[in-house]
Image (cartoon, helix red, strand yellow):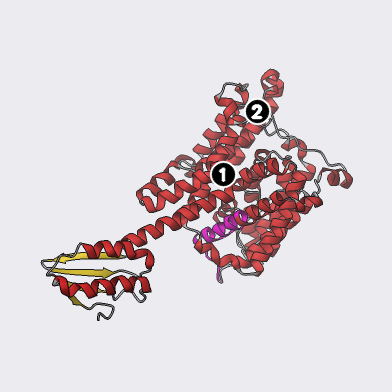
């Protein structure tokens, strides 16, 4: 670390903090948890996980991709304290995966399933945040909005609409061309405008301001007040099998999102040597273990904050540590300022995040790549929405495997005719599963023809395949069929 890196790391840490602050608060709110839980998660990710992580640029904290898992898990387990027990177990599992060097298996997850998972998270996030953008501060669902059982808030809709407009404007060339605006994160601007609506609304339009639900952070005047705010795990909950299901789900999905973020970071800012995925998983495991003990939320490496960290010129881990320290300071001593943030502004940030995860362009790209990509992609989305994250990912992987087997099976054998010559090509190793296809092709060969077998690409033939070829070869002479390069001996 030298003066040059400090000049770049300090402003980078400030920008990452400004991006992370509304996301930490919004993700906690979307998960139905106190806003302080989101800040605490950002602090653990920014200070503890960063200290252990092999990456200089990966920013860890609460992830929008885990919101739906947190909400569903707390409902299933019945309490946040039971969920914290599952989070501790998930952290232990992540540490074990890191020690067992399981990070290399990320390459086994098909790209179609990964994209389907991200799109499903985006869709669920949008479904969850629409009622908040329309003015609810409770647990109202989208179905109540559709059924007309929902009370709309004009002020909340206006704040959310302006927030979405700001987030869209920040992606346009006009705003990007202004260097000063490029340094100010769009989510921060959306949240600041929302704060102005609450501050001036209280003075000018009290009736409208009352319809604008906002953040509720407690003020900490002592360490005992801070300790009282922290939730403790339910240590007896480990006996509940559902806790273990949640733990496995959290461990797998959090590890997957972390390793995907690490892969994406390699393209943005290569590191030499590349950070070890196994050490990264171990660091994330320690983070989630600590988060479970302290009453925080699940932690992953998040690509949005990480990419911002890289784009603003961070050189070392110091920028991430600065962002974590600023989150801690903000949560402890500036709660009154944060309480001016309306939930509708945070909903706008999360709606836009969900849209980016499930953008229509992603669906178009998958359809253009053919059925082998879009069938598992859609199966993953449907599975996650209907059955949950872990089951949905399993459905997506199973669909991809079955489709790949089908395509491989279909293209393994090829019969081509040249006048009275037939060339039978083996494109790969053959097993008993290829027998129906092989028998069908052999049946197409007429009498008094010549059959040439090209089996250079097949290093292995199943005994059942050899038996079919043997049987055809023994009857070929009676039908006037001449064999060339036959792969098995014919008596």
What secondary structure is the magenta-colored segment mainly?
helix
Residue 271 magenta-highlighted: yes
In percent of width and height, residue 16 lies at 63, 50
- Residue sitting at 72 percent across and 44 percent down? 77
Part of the protein shown in magenta: 253-272
Residue receiving disc 1: 387
In percent of width and height, residue 24 lies at 67, 45
For the C terminus, the image quarter is bottom left
> What element does badge 1 sit on?
helix
Residue 467 can be seen in this image:
yes
The numbered mark, 2 or 1, whose residue comes first in the sequence reads 2
Query: In the rendered view, does 488 fall on the left or right side of 479?
Result: right
Decide: marks 2, 1 in contact (CB < 8 A)? no
Query: In the rendered view, does 262 fall on the left or right side of 18?
Result: left
Of residues 125 and 324, the one drawn nearer to the viewer in this rendering: 125
Residue receiving disc 2: 136
Foreground mark, 2 or 1?
1
- Residue sitting at 77 percent across and 41 percent down? 334
Query: In the rendered view, does 240 fall on the left or right side of 271?
Result: right
In percent of width and height, residue 481 lies at 15, 72
Would you identify the image quadrant in which residue 490 lies?
A: bottom left
């Amino acid at each position: 670390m030298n003066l040059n890196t400090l000049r770049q790391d300090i402003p980078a840490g400030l920008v990452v903090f400004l991006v992370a602050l509304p996301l930490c608060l919004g993700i906690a709110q979307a998960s139905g948890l106190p806003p302080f839980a989101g800040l605490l998660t950002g602090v653990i990710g920014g200070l503890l996980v960063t200290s252990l992580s092999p990456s200089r640029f990966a920013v860890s904290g609460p992830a929008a991709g885990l919101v739906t898992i947190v909400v569903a898990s707390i409902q299933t387990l019945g309490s946040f304290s039971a969920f914290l027990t599952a989070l501790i177990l998930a952290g232990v599992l992540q540490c074990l995966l890191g020690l067992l060097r399981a990070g290399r298996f990320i390459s086994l997850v098909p790209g179609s399933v990964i994209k389907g998972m991200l799109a499903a998270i985006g869709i669920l996030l949008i479904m969850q945040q629409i009622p908040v953008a329309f003015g609810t501060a409770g647990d109202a669902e989208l179905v109540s909005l559709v059924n007309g059982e929902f009370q709309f808030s004009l002020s909340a809709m206006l704040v959310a609409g302006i927030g979405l407009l700001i987030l869209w404007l920040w992606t346009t060339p006009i705003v990007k061309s202004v260097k000063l605006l490029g340094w100010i994160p769009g989510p921060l601007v959306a949240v600041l405008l929302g704060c102005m609506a609450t501050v001036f609304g209280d003075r000018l339009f009290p009736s409208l301001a009352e319809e604008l639900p906002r953040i509720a952070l407690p003020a900490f005047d002592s360490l005992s007040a801070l300790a009282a705010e922290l939730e403790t795990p339910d240590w007896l909950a480990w006996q509940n099998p559902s806790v273990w299901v949640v733990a496995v789900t959290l461990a797998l999905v959090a590890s997957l999102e972390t390793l995907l973020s690490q892969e994406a970071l390699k393209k943005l800012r290569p590191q030499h040597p590349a950070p070890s995925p196994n050490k990264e998983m171990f660091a994330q495991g320690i983070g989630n273990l600590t988060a479970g003990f302290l009453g925080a939320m699940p932690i992953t490496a998040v690509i949005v904050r990480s990419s911002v960290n890289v784009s603003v010129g961070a050189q070392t881990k110091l920028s991430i540590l600065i962002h974590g320290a600023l989150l801690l300071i903000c949560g402890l001593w500036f709660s009154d300022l944060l309480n001016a943030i309306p939930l509708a502004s945070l909903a706008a940030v999360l709606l836009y995040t969900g849209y980016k995860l499930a953008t229509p362009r992603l669906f178009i790209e998958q359809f253009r790549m053919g059925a082998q990509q879009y069938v598992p992609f859609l199966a993953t989305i449907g599975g996650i929405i209907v059955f949950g994250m872990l089951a949905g990912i399993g459905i997506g992987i199973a669909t991809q495997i079955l489709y790949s087997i089908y395509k491989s099976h279909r293209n393994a054998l090829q019969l081509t005719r040249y006048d009275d010559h037939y060339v039978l090509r083996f494109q790969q190793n053959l097993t008993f599963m290829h027998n129906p296809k092989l028998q069908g092709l052999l049946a197409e060969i007429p009498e008094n023809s010549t059959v040439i077998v090209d089996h250079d690409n097949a290093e292995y033939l199943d005994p059942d395949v050899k038996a079919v070829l043997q049987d055809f070869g023994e009857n070929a002479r009676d039908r006037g069929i001449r064999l060339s390069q036959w792969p098995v001996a014919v008596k």
